């Protein structure tokens, strides 16, 4: 059979110090922005947005930081990581409005122009 191991979940400080060590090319200001964004999404009063924040696993946060080190905008990196194009339309629209207002997503601006 399989052996299972359980470990306690990391708090935010531990999580982002680990991300900083895994993504050394990402600037500390970008890591702080990702941290603020993650906390904002996870603590959002709208249950749908907080559910999206819960989808930001460690793997996705590392992916976002790597995208940022390659020159991506924060909002765009989040959209790419969360595959927002496959979200239900109302959920995607609310999420796009939030990311446009707070983190300057170019994808959201392009979507508005094309509508």
Image: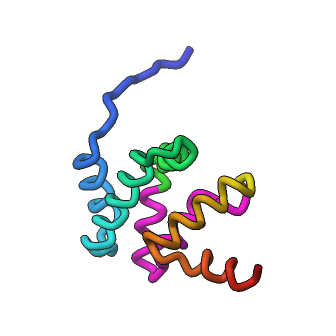
Q: Residue furthest front?
A: 45
Q: Nearer the viewer, residue 37 or 97?
A: 97
Instruction: Reply above or below: 30 against 91.
Output: below
Instruction: Reply above or below: 43 against 1.
Output: below
Quadrant where the N terminus lies?
Answer: top right
Quarter-of-image position of residue 93:
bottom right
- Residue located 28% across and 62% down the image: 20
* Magenta span contains residue 82: yes
- Residue located 70% across and 85% down the image: 113
Q: Nearer the viewer, residue 70 or 81?
A: 81
**Residue bounds of the magenta highlight:** 61-86
- In the rendered image, residue 52, in percent from the top left (x then y), is placed at 54, 48
- Residue located 36% across and 52% down the image: 39
Quarter-of-image position of residue 106:
bottom right
Q: Nearer the viewer, residue 85 or 1?
A: 85
Quadrant where the C terminus lies?
Answer: bottom right
């Amino acid at each position: 059979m399989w052996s299972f191991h359980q470990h306690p979940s990391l708090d935010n400080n531990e999580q982002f110090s680990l991300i900083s060590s895994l993504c050394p090319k990402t600037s500390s200001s970008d890591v702080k922005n990702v941290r603020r964004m993650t906390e904002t999404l996870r603590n959002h009063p709208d249950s749908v947005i907080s559910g999206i924040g819960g989808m930001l696993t460690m793997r996705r946060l590392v992916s976002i930081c790597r995208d940022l080190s390659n020159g991506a905008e924060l909002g765009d990196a989040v959209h790419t990581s969360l595959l927002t194009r496959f979200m239900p339309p109302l959920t995607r629209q609310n999420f796009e409005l939030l990311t446009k207002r707070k983190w300057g997503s170019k994808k959201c601006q392009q979507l508005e122009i094309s509508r």
